[in-house]
Amino acid sequence: MKLENKEKQLLKVLLLAILFYFVLLRIDSVTGTLAAAGGLLKPFIIGGAMAFIINVPMVKVEKYLEKKRLKKGRRALAFFITLTLMLAAVALFLTIVVPQLVQAVSTLADHLQQLTDKIPALLENHSSNLTFIEEYIASLNINWQNIGQQLIDWLKAFALALVGSGSGLVGGVVSGFTTAVLSIIFSIYLLFGKENVSCGLTRLTKAVAGEKISAHIFHVCSIAYRSFSNFLSGQCLEAVILGCMFIAAMTVFRMPYAFLVGVVIAVTALIPVFGAFIGGGVGVVVIAIENPVQALWFLLLFIVLQQLEGNLIYPKVVGNSVGLPSILVFVSVILGNSLMGVAGMLVFIPAVSVVYTLVKEFVLRREALARPPASDGEEQAL
């Protein structure tokens, strides 16, 4: 007996409902299984993310080499150039940040030393006014011996716990190193064999889902790749623009540590919307070590530039790169931060862009179907 299409659809819905019911009954086992699977797949997930990030500039380098008609070893050269540029950026960051950070710490140590030198004289000059502290401490009847014994017991317990967790710590370091090595190897394999991987996944999807459903899956994947790669490029561009703005403004107003603060703000600005505030806080602390008054002026400068960046630059650069209106960029950041923290902010903007593009295409198709056909006179006029 053959089933009609409606009966087949009803049977599928019924089977899915039964499966969902049993998942809810065994939710603890399901979550445990998913967590275990996530642990096993962790190197491949991290490696895939690394490959995706490296692939964004690597594709542009490879296209440039293709224009130069370089065929032999083009991919290996593109990978080497991309990796060199990324390592050079990290080295430049360390070259700029570390010396100025050492200078800031040295300045802070000098201030602390000066303050330490002044404390004895200050206590001596006001010793007559501090007798009430001694009288108050004496009136508390504190058992210092009991406190000392409790402190010793706490240190013993802490030492035993530290020794007991030594094997776990070593195991964690070994596991982390193994995960890092496997992730790097897997990312390199994906970058050098992405055509083979793509072809294999395409054939598997068509064999499982069929041509029609596969076409929709490939279309969504294409939109997702474009949205995520454009978001990554736009976020990096926005961070560079913001960092340059701070370096230029702080140099004009002769504020200390202009390059240090500008680079730190540019790096933290990779976190959407809220990242620059982290860099701004670091800038206030570092400048306050040198000159507290200039730290207040920097805070005012930060508020002005942050308003300019948040309301004008970020929505235009990042919003346009992923094809989202400014209001949806802001909503995506708020939702992502509420649900997943920093990772959510990085993921939700391109994810919402994918949904926005699909909804927009759906609306355009429905409007095209609902539009009445043109008459002969209208066709002739057109």
Image (spheres, helix red, strand yellow):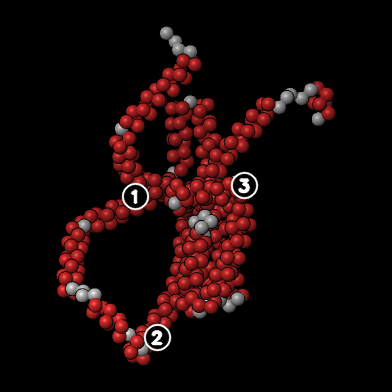
Quadrant location of the N terminus? Answer: top left
Closer to the camera in the image, 166 or 109: 109
Residue 238: quarter of image: bottom right
Residue at 31 percent across and 55 percent down: it is 177
Res 86 visible: yes
Q: Earlier in the sequence, mark 1 or mark 2?
A: 2
Residue 159: quarter of image: bottom left
Res 117 visible: no
Task: Quote the CA–CA distance across marks 1 and 2.
Answer: 51 Å
What is the x, y in percent for residue 264?
49, 66
Closer to the camera in the image, 353 or 212: 353
Q: Earlier in the sequence, mark 1 or mark 3?
A: 1
What is the x, y in percent for residue 116?
36, 84
- 79 vs 326, left or right, is left
Quadrant location of the C terminus? Answer: top right
Amino acid type, label 2: Gln
Q: Secondary structure at mark 3?
A: loop
Task: Residue under label 3, please give it.
Answer: 325
Task: Quote the CA–CA distance across marks 2 and 3.
Answer: 54 Å
Task: Residue under label 2, please give it.
Answer: 114
Residue 182's label in the rendered image is 1
What is the x, y in percent for residue 81?
49, 57
Mark 3 crowdedness (10 Å alpha carbons): few <14, some 14-19, many ≥20: some
The mark lying in front, picked from 1 and 2, is: 2
